[in-house]
Amino acid sequence: MTSLRETSIEELAAALPSAAAVVIDVREPHELGGGHIPGALTIPCGQLEARIVTAAPDRARPIVLYCASGARSLRSLPALDALGYREVSSLRGGFKAWTKANLPVDGVAGGLTAAQRDRYSRHILLPEVGEDGQRKLLASKVLCVGAGGLGSPASLYLAAAGVGTLGLVDDDVVDASNLQRQVVHATDRLGVPKVESAARTLTALNPDVAVVPHKTRLTSDNALDIVARYDVIVDGADNFATRYLLNDVALRLGKPIVHASVFRFEGQLTVFPANGAPCYRCLFPEPPPAGAAPSCQEAGVLGVLPGVLGVLQATEALKLLLGMPTIAGRLLIWDAARSRFRELMLRRDPRCPTCGDGVDRAAIPLVDYVAFCAGA
C-alpha cells in the first residue's frame, strides 16, 4: 500500500488468489461491458455507504475499491473510514490500468448488450448475481408445467428476470373462470390455447426470452423427451397423476423440481433437488383416495394465493439456476386466511420406491399415472 492509500495492480494481482481483500467495483452498470476484475463485487459509488456493511461485514478485512481510472474510488475512501473500516485503498489507475497490463478479466465473453445491462441493472448490482449470473440466467432453460394459476406468476417473473428459454406445457384453453387468478392471460383471449396466450404476454414483457409452447398434456410417452430439454422444472400441475409422473421423470433425468400446490386459502412449496433426496414420493408415498382431495374447480381457491406461491416458485427456480441454496428438504406452508407461514422438515425415506436405498433411478418405470392415482 502506498502513502496515498492506493494499491498497485501488481499488489492486487498477487493478492487475488488468496481472496484476502474484498475487491469492489464502484463503476456504474453501463460501464461494465468490458468485464470486471475476477471476484469483484459491483457496488456503484452512490450506493457504497448503504450496501458496504452487507457486502463486507468484517471491518478489519482489507478492501480495495476500483473505478475506471482510480479517481472515483479514491474519493470514496473517507466514507468507508467514517464507517469504521480499517484498511481501505483505491486501485491505482483503476480498471484501465488493469486491462492495459493484460491481467485477467471476467464477464467479457458473451457479455451483455448495453440494453441488457440497463434492463437487468438491479440484478447486476447484487453480488449473488452480477453480470456473470445474469448471463447464466439468459443461457438457462426452465420448463413450467401448467400455464394456469401457478404457472402464470412463475412464468411472468422468470421472463422478467431474463431466463433465456421458457417452456410451457398445457393442453387447455383460456376460460373466463381462469381470469380471477391466471394473470398471464386476458379477456380478449378466451378460447385461445393457454400456451399461446402466455407466450404472447411473456414475449411482450421481455423479448430476450424464447418461449417454447408445448400444447399437450404430459404423459409417460412424451415426458422424458420434453423434460430433458430443460434445466429446472416448475411444477404448476393441478393433479396428482402429473405430479407423480414429473417426480419419476425428474429422478431418471437428474432434474430439480420446484413444487407448489394450492387449495382454498392454503398453499405449500418445496424443492425436490436434482439428486432426488427427498422426492415427491417421500412426501406423498401414495395418492389420496379418489374424491379425498378436490380440485380448485371443485373447492375453490383465493385468487391471490397462487400468485404468492407462483412467485415463490420463481424465486427458488432462480436460486437453483444461480447455484444458491434453496428450500430443498423443507416444506413451506402458507395459510393466507391467518397470514401465517409454517415450515416442516422433509427427509428422504430409505424405503421410497423412487429415491430409496438401492433404487436405480435411471431405471424407474413410467407407468399409467392416471390409473395409478385412481387406485387401478
Image (cartoon, rainbow, N blue to C red):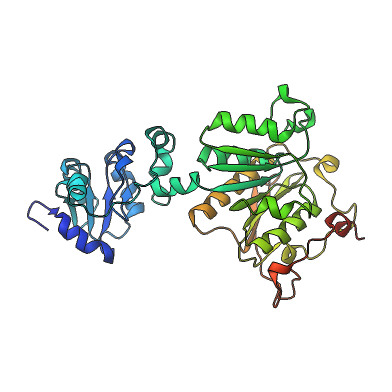
Q: Nearer the viewer, residue 360 or 343?
A: 360
In the image, is 293 to the left or to the right of 341?
Answer: right
Q: Position of residue 14 (x, y in %)?
A: 20, 63
Any part of residue 74 in sight: yes
Q: Position of residue 351 (x, y in %)?
A: 74, 75
Q: Nearer the viewer, residue 86 or 36?
A: 36
Q: Position of residue 20 (x, y in %)?
A: 26, 64
Q: Position of residue 208 (x, y in %)?
A: 51, 35
Q: Is residue 362 above or below residue 176?
A: below
In the image, is 201 to the left or to the right of 37?
Answer: right
Quadrant in which the N terminus is drawn: bottom left
Seen at 70% across and 75% down, the residue is: 350
Q: How many marks?
A: 0
Q: Is residue 52 above or below residue 18?
A: above
Q: Residue furthest left?
A: 3
Seen at 78% across and 61% down, the residue is: 366
Q: Residue furthest top?
A: 188
> Based on the displayed image, in which of its 4 quarters is residue 345 positioned?
bottom right
Any part of residue 126 in sight: no
Quadrant in which the C terminus is drawn: bottom right
